[in-house]
Amino acid sequence: MTTARTTPADSTSDWAGSPLSTLHHLARQARSLPVEQYSDETGHVIRLEVPGIDPAQDLAVSVETGSLTVRCERRHAGLEDGLEDDQSEFRYGSFARTVALPLGANIHDVSATCRDGILTVRVGMQPEYQKGARRIPVQVEP
């Protein structure tokens, strides 16, 4: 008798609700960059946690219509000569996060600053998409 093992690639219908699916999602989330977004009077603001990243060397921000992508790499600093790494819960390697931009985001008006491990990206909004309400006069035709 042959027993067949199913993997996520073999059976997507069983995979979606399984505990392994949840673990896979959590593992992917752990390798992404935590983000918060909000809009204010200056436009749309996106903040990402990037602790331990050298922004001058290991951080790249790109924007295209509808999305903003941040890529970075956290490198292992290495240990002093003669010491071994017994345990490390730090995460090293490449990380990336793409976030959707709101309708009307002006990709030609983007700035990014990094301070104390927080990357702040400000995206201006095109005037016709600014938040707010106004009354529209109705012309009466004779």
Image (tube, grey):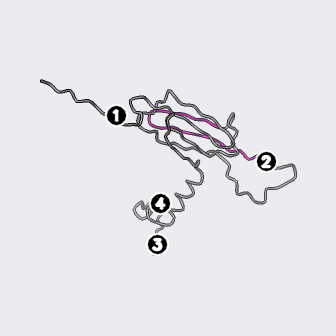
* Image vertical order of residue 29 relative to residue 112, above or below: below
Residue position for label 4: 8
Q: Nearer the viewer, mark 1 or mark 2?
A: 1
- Residue type pointed to by label 2: Gly
Which span of residues is magenta-colored? 59-77
Q: Is residue 142 left or right of residue 121?
A: left
Name the element at disc 4: loop
Residue position for label 3: 2
Say which mark, if any, is on residue 116. Answer: none
Task: Give the residue at x 26% y 29%.
Answer: 137
Q: Measure how far apart labels 2 and 3 are at the Cα level.
A: 48 Å
Q: Nearer the viewer, mark 4 or mark 2?
A: 2
Residue position for label 2: 78
Residue 23, image x and y in percent?
A: 54, 62
Quarter of the rendering containing residue 83 = bottom right
Can you name the residue that lies furthest to the top here? 142
Residue 115, image x and y in percent?
A: 67, 39
Dot 2: within a 10 Å radius of its alpha carbon, few (fewer than 14), some, or many (20 or more) residues? few
Residue position for label 1: 134
Can you name the residue that lies furthest to the right here? 82
- Residue type pointed to by label 1: Arg
Q: Measure how far apart labels 1 and 2 are at the Cα level.
A: 59 Å
Q: Measure how far apart labels 3 and 4 are at the Cα level.
A: 20 Å
Task: Give the residue at x 48% y 33%.
Answer: 64
- Dot 1 or dot 4, earlier in sequence: 4
Residue 44, image x and y in percent?
A: 50, 37
